[in-house]
Amino acid sequence: MGGIVLELQKGALDETVSIESLLRKAYLVAKKLKLRDLEEWINQEQNGYENHLPEYRNVRGEIKAWNPYNGWIPMILSADIADEVSCIPLGLLSLQYRIHIIRVTAQCV
């Protein structure tokens, strides 16, 4: 067991190791050590949350519009509409899909 824990620690410090790989190893460690809470958390992070969504899975942003004279400017929206459209719950999506969204978005910017 010590070997996989050391691999997990080493991988966590290596920027070339994917988050998916780290989570798979952490899941294996949690299973073997019977750490049910950690096992459940990793499973939900990988596959998406079904029930309670942690606050850190809500992504907030500011809605902007392109103004040809001033560039990107904040849109003026009523408070209830702004709250509705500026917060996206990413926890409902699997980890692989969230990573895909980040990669596609990065290519568009």
Image: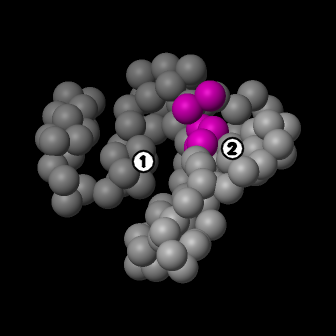
Residue 20: give x, y in percent of width and height.
Answer: 41, 54
Q: Identify residue type, mark 2.
A: Cys
Q: Residue at x 41, y 44 (%)?
A: 23
The answer to whether 12 appears left or right of 44 in the picture is left
The answer to whether 103 appears left or right of 84 in the picture is left
Spatial CA distance of label 2 from label 1 is 29 Å
Q: Quadrant of the rendered structure where residue 89 is?
A: top right
Residue 43 seen in the figure: no
Residue 106: give x, y in percent of width and height.
Answer: 41, 71
**What residue did someone put label 1 on?**
24
Tag nearer the camera, 2 or 1: 2
Provide the residue span drawn in magenta.
Answer: 55-60
Q: Which mark is residue 3?
A: none
Q: Secondary structure at mark 2?
A: strand
The answer to whether 7 appears left or right of 97 in the picture is left
Q: Residue at x 77, y 48 (%)?
A: 77
